[in-house]
Image: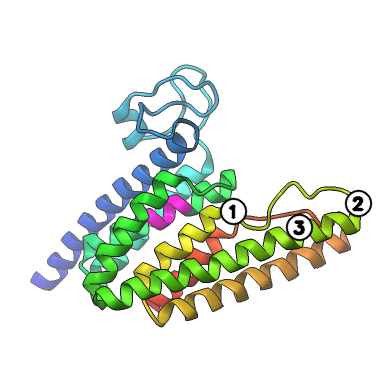
C-alpha cells in the first residue's frame, strides 16, 4: 500500500511539474521569436497582454478578442506531462530528474520555434551552450564534451556551406535565385550544442541519425509532392527538429 501511495504521489507531482514545464515552453515560444526578450504573455491574434494566472493555469480564450489558443498549447502541455512522469518513474543515468527536464524543455523550445518560424534564435543558442557544457561535463567529462562540441560544430558548418553552394548551383540551373536556404547558421550552433550534450563519439551517431531521418522525410515529402504535382525545388523545411530527434535517440535509447 505504501508503494502504491508513493507512486501516486510521484506521478501527481511529476504531472504538475510537466504541466508547468509545458506552459513555460509555450510562453517562451510565443514571446521570444517576436520580442527576443521576456515580456508579459500576449495574445497571438490581437497582441493584447494576458493575465499570468489565466495564461499559465487555464489557457483558453483571449479576454480581449476571444480568440482561442492554438492546439499546439495543449499538445505541448500533454507531451511534457508524459515526459515528466516518464522521467520520474524511469530516471536516465548520468543526471537527475530536474537536469533532464531542463534539457528537454530547451529542446522542446528550439523545436517549436524552428518548426513555426524556421528560426533558431541566438539567445536560445547561447543558453544551449551553457546547458550543453554543464550537462555534458557532468555526464561525460570535459574532454569528451568539448571534442563532441567541436565535431558537431565542424560537421554542421560543412553541411551549411554545402547547402549554400547547392542553392547557388541549383539557382543557376533554374535561372532564378533560391531564396530559402537548406540550412541556417542556427543549425550549425545547434550542432555545437548537441555535440556538447552527447559528447564524443556519440555526436557521430547523432548526426548520422539526423541525416537518415531528414533524408527519409525529404524522400517521402518529394514523392507526395510529385504525385500531387506541387513539388518545388526551392522548398525547404526546418532541420532543427531532426537534429533534436537524433540527439534524443542517442541520449535515451
Q: CA distance from mark 2 to mark 3?
A: 12 Å
**Left or right of 216 on screen, residue 208:** left
Q: Main secondary structure of the magenta part?
A: helix
The single residue placed furthest to the top in the displayed view is 64
Q: Secondary structure at mark 1?
A: loop
Q: Is residue 168 magenta?
A: no
User: Which residue has dot 2 on it?
Assistant: 175
Q: Is residue 221 left or right of residue 82?
A: right
The alpha-carbon separation of the residues under discs 1 and 3 comes to 12 Å
- Residue 29: name its quadrant: top left
Q: Position of residue 66 (x, y in %)?
A: 51, 22
Q: Position of residue 231 (x, y in %)?
A: 84, 57
Q: Name above or below for residue 58 compared with residue 21.
A: above
Say which mark, if any, is on residue 2: none
Q: Which residues are magenta?
A: 105-110
Give the image location of residue 81, x and y in percent.
34, 56
Q: Residue at x 59, y 60 (%)?
A: 239
Q: Label 1: which residue?
A: 184
Q: Which mark is residue 167?
A: 3
> Depth check: 208 or 27 in front?
208
Amino acid at each position: 500500500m505504501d508503494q502504491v501511495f508513493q507512486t501516486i504521489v510521484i506521478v501527481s507531482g511529476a504531472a504538475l511539474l510537466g504541466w508547468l514545464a509545458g506552459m513555460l515552453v509555450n510562453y517562451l515560444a510565443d514571446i521570444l521569436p517576436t520580442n527576443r526578450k521576456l515580456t508579459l504573455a500576449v495574445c497571438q491574434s490581437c497582441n493584447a497582454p494576458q493575465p499570468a494566472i489565466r495564461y499559465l493555469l487555464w489557457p483558453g480564450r483571449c479576454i480581449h478578442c476571444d480568440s482561442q489558443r492554438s492546439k499546439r498549447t495543449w499538445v505541448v502541455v500533454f507531451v511534457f506531462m508524459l515526459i515528466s512522469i516518464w522521467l520520474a518513474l524511469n530516471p536516465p543515468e548520468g543526471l537527475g530528474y530536474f537536469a533532464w527536464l531542463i534539457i528537454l524543455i530547451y529542446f522542446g523550445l528550439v523545436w517549436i520555434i524552428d518548426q513555426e518560424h524556421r528560426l533558431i534564435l541566438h539567445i536560445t543558442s547561447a543558453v544551449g551552450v551553457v546547458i550543453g557544457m554543464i550537462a555534458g561535463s557532468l555526464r561525460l567529462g570535459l574532454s569528451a564534451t568539448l571534442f563532441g562540441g567541436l565535431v558537431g560544430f565542424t560537421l554542421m558548418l560543412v553541411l551549411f556551406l554545402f547547402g549554400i553552394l547547392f542553392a547557388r548551383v541549383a539557382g543557376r540551373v533554374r535561372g532564378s535565385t533560391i531564396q530559402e536556404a537548406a540550412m541556417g547558421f542556427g543549425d550549425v550552433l545547434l550542432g555545437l550544442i548537441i555535440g556538447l550534450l552527447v559528447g564524443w563519439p556519440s555526436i557521430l551517431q547523432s548526426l548520422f541519425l539526423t541525416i537518415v531521418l531528414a533524408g527519409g522525410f525529404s524522400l517521402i515529402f518529394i514523392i507526395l509532392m510529385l504525385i500531387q504535382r506541387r513539388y518545388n525545388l526551392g522548398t525547404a523545411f526546418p532541420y532543427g527538429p531532426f537534429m533534436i530527434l537524433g540527439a534524443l535517440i542517442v541520449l535515451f535509447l
